[in-house]
Amino acid sequence: MLLDNPIFDKFMVEYAPNELIFCEFEPGNEFYIIQSGRVKIVKIVNNTEKTIDVLKPGDIFGEMAILEEQPRSASAIALEHCKILKFHRDNFDALIQGNPQMAYKLLVIFSKRIYDAKRRLMILLLEEPQLKVMDVLIMLAESDPHIDMQGPITLRCNIEEVANWAGMQINEVQKILTHFNATGKIELYNDRIHIKNIRDFQRIVNSRRKSS
Amino acid sequence: MAITMRSYKSGSIVYMEGDKSEYIYILKSGRVVLTTKKVEDKTWVEEKVHVKPGEFFGVKSALGRYPRDETAQTLGDTVVLVLTLADFEKMILQNVGVVKKMLRVFSNQLRKIGKTVREVLGEGESINPEVELFKLGEYYYNMGRPQQAMYAFKKYLEYYPDSKYASQAKDKLQQLKSGNFATSSPGVGFSTQTRSGQRIADENMTDFNIEEEDISEQSKPETTRSPLGGEMDDFLSDNKSNDILDDLTLDDQTFSEVSMQDINEIFYEGMRLFASGQYQDAVKLYERIINSKSLQGEAEKRIYEKAHFELGRCHYKLGKYNEALNTLSGLIKKFPKSTVIKNALLYMGMIFEDLKNYEKAIAYYSKAASMEPKDQTNRDAQNRLMKIQNSQGRR
């Protein structure tokens, strides 16, 4: 959302390339709307900085701070020179009063976050590790609108990502994926996974989920 | 706006869990029950929610473009308004109060789910943002990213000025500000840093356990699991898909996920370039190894550590002393038990000698010379140490 009204000038903050906008675990009271430049959202997972998202002008971030103070769940780093509107929670009501389209955008963001979190719970609450791994693959397939689940599919992901989603250790996930690979269910590459029949995985996971 | 109205008999299904649809509903009259699932004690239990007249339903799944995660069924004769996403957006823009209410409801739900996720992952209360913020600073500090480290330490001191790592955060911030955070002498700064690093590491045992397990698994001969690199080899030798090769060379993204074979190749290509004096090109290759994320097993880990040393050595040859010191001290901090530590210390000594900082050079050489097991590197360090001491003594 680009807000080029001069009223907002006093909320405009400029960031240099590589500058931290906020960092993980820092208490958060502000939310941000990018006006120019790109922002990288990163998290330290197992001692490695992982990029979760790259945001572009018009995007909103730090929105969890809108309703209450919470530690940030990730860090935001300016990828290039950025102009960003920074609003304190206290200004939120006034802001959306004048910009209802922003409120709509926020509703969409929150809807997605809720679904993603619920979907993640569905994975985590499966009991068997193989099922968790299968369900992560299903989830990744579902979240890509270009994927047709009827045929063979290719997911752009690596073992580390799958492990992260499944809440499992990398070597355990590797064992399972290697097994799927050996039995011909998937073809494992270092940057992607090719799945012959994701519907099979869905059937297996759904039958186990109901019985539990 | 062309909002349609729809009438249902009792017991009708408005939509089913799993349906995909972009409609949003408002209950006009009658009753609708939403059957959904929520988590209690780590199991899914059914939950029924009654929609009141005038309320929206089906909002989240339509907005987020996800399958419905509940089933909506009528109780008694019911009339609903059916909105498309566009209708809904128009309506919302005219009624900000409704959005605010919805946002509040949504953020509450999100917070509850987030809490459940953390509980299931066993992270419940164990994550202490105060400690984590300090650890974040340490992470960037150790990675040689002073800008990010300074930010984290500053924030730490701002929010937790009297906490247990405050004095450490202050020290590090001071070092970062003075710009010579990597050049502390081994006698003083270096050893305290290792100790503080150790303390942090202890609190973060899980990360270390993973690595430890990884190594022990690898060394078991009967283990059935083959590293992904092995899989890659098979694919390549079978020539099943030639495009993998193209991907590896063309796609920047795959650089971070290079397989074992590639890492070996890259490492030795770097050595070759170094030997022929093409330091700048070697730097690129070592950086590629250091930036790769999915290294597994002892062999790859060793190459990863060595790449740090080689990178430092390239920087030294290029006369980039600061970068060389950053890389080498980063290596010492990150892998205090690495086999290349001694060489790293030797090179740091050489850098300081070049910079005519003889005091520090002596400190690093002595440290290298005293390290077990004794080999050629110790002798090199000892010889250089004696040379400096002689020339210093003569002055």
Image (cartoon, rainbow, N blue to C red):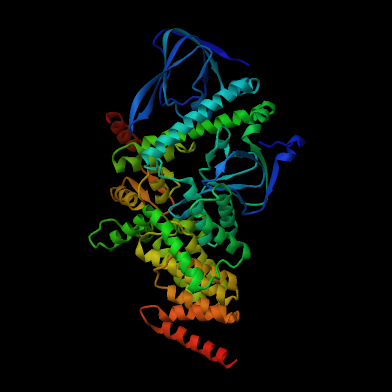
The residue shown at (58%, 15%) is B3
The residue shown at (43%, 76%) is B342
- Give the image location of residue A76, x and y in percent: 57, 47
The quadrant in which residue B315 appears is bottom right
The quadrant in which residue B241 appears is bottom left
Q: Can I make out residue B325 in this image?
A: yes
> Most extreme residue toward the top, as rendered?
B77
The residue shown at (56%, 75%) is B316
The residue shown at (43%, 86%) is B379
- Give the image location of residue B187, x and y in percent: 48, 74
> Most extreme residue toward the bottom, as rendered?
B394
> Most extreme residue toward the left, as rendered?
B222
Q: Where's the C terminus of chain A, which quadrant?
A: top left
Above or below, A27 against B36 in this view is below
- In the image, B304 versus B80, the foreground residue is B304
Q: Can I make out residue A150 in this image?
A: no
- In the image, B309 versus B300, the foreground residue is B309
- In the image, B14 versus A113, the foreground residue is A113
- Give the image location of residue B221, x and y in percent: 24, 63
Above or below, B49 against B208 in this view is above
Above or below, A10 against B229 in this view is above
The quadrant in which residue B373 appears is bottom left
Q: Is residue A91 left or right of residue B325?
A: right
- In the image, B46 versus A67, the foreground residue is A67
- Give the image location of residue A97, x and y in percent: 67, 26
